[in-house]
Image: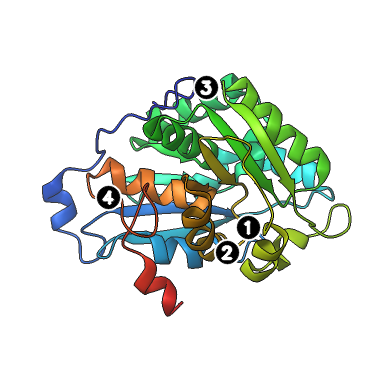
């Protein structure tokens, strides 16, 4: 079970090394990825970030709800249904790649829901928000600067989530995300983000979080971390890190002090 309140995630592998080595694909880890229906970013970034010889199977979080808020809540409410789409696949872990849902659901409700599914399926289920919290604790960060592509109401829910988790928010940069409930987050590019963030200062933060799984983040991390001199994290980076870390194959690198080794793959992505 995941310990949300401390940001610590049980590192025990759910599949034995012998079972992993017998696979045709995914001998360095087989991961399920759940991503929102219109998200064009999770698969490309996870493909870049996850270690070589690992494999991922992806399922879409689908909803007919008209508003973004309703969709995000439904994604969490129906988590068990979405995981059932994987049938009997024996994963090392499943990643819920939708940070916004966790910002709207109470942590205790989410913890209980995930624990019940984990008990049934026998493998860990890790939300993007839990992965971020675990990464912040691993890095020893107590204060956080946020870069948010969300509508303002979801940005405020994000701020409230991290403050409840015990982090001081030292600075916040609100990016344009289109009109109201649209999918403007998916249209942002690294070039746009870096232009808007050119004068952004983290206000003494220990780390910067580029929140949201739908906005491209990897080239932003490569540019901002050296300039700011502190860790720059994203939802997808933290998810890939915790998946690799569970199997003991995560290591820092030139790209990020959290998880390295992916710049070459990004260059040809």
Marks 3 and 4, Cα distance to the nearest angstrom?
31 Å
Mark nearer the viewer, 3 or 4: 4
Chain-order first, disc 4 or disc 2: 2
Q: Is residue 95 among what the camera can see?
A: yes
User: Which residue is the site of mark 4?
Assistant: 251
Tell me if label 3 and label 4 are in contact, CB under 8 Å.
Answer: no
Q: Nearer the viewer, residue 23 or 183?
A: 183
Please identify the quadrant where the N terminus is shown: top left
Tell me if label 1 and label 2 are in contact, CB under 8 Å.
Answer: yes
Mark nearer the viewer, 3 or 2: 2
User: Which residue is the site of mark 2?
Assistant: 41
Q: Which colour style is shown?
A: rainbow
Q: x, y percentage for residue 269?
A: 46, 77
Q: Secondary structure at mark 4?
A: loop
Residue at the extreme left of the image, as rendered: 18
User: Which residue is the site of mark 1?
Assistant: 214
User: Which residue is the site of mark 3?
Assistant: 112
Marks 1 and 2, Cα distance to the nearest angstrom?
5 Å
Residue positioned 57% across, 20% down in the render? 166
Marks 1 and 4, Cα distance to the nearest angstrom?
24 Å
Q: x, y percentage for residue 81?
A: 56, 43
């Amino acid at each position: 079970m995941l310990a949300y309140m401390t940001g610590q995630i049980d590192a025990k592998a759910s599949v034995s090394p012998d079972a992993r080595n017998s696979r045709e694909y995914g001998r360095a880890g087989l991961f399920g990825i759940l991503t929102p229906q219109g998200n064009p970013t999770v698969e490309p970034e996870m493909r870049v970030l996850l270690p070589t010889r690992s494999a991922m199977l992806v399922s879409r979080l689908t909803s007919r709800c008209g508003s973004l808020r309703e969709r995000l809540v439904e994604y969490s409410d129906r988590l068990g249904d979405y995981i059932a789409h994987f049938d009997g696949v024996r994963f090392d872990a499943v990643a819920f790649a939708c940070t916004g849902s966790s910002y709207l659901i109470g942590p205790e409700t989410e913890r209980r829901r995930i624990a019940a599914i984990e008990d049934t399926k026998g493998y860990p289920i890790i939300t993007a928000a839990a992965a971020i919290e675990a990464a912040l604790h691993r890095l020893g960060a107590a204060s956080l600067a946020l870069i948010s592509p969300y509508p303002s109401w979801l940005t405020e829910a994000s701020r409230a989530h991290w403050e409840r988790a015990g982090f001081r928010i030292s600075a916040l940069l609100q990016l344009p995300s289109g009109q109201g409930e649209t999918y403007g987050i998916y249209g942002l590019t690294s070039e746009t983000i870096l232009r808007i963030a050119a004068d952004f200062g983290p206000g003494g933060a220990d780390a910067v979080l580029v929140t949201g799984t739908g906005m491209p983040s990897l080239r932003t991390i490569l540019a901002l971390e050296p300039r700011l001199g502190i860790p720059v994290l994203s939802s997808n980076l933290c998810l890939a890190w915790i998946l690799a870390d569970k199997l003991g194959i995560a290591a820092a690198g030139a790209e990020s002090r959290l998880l390295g080794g992916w710049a070459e793959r990004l260059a040809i992505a």
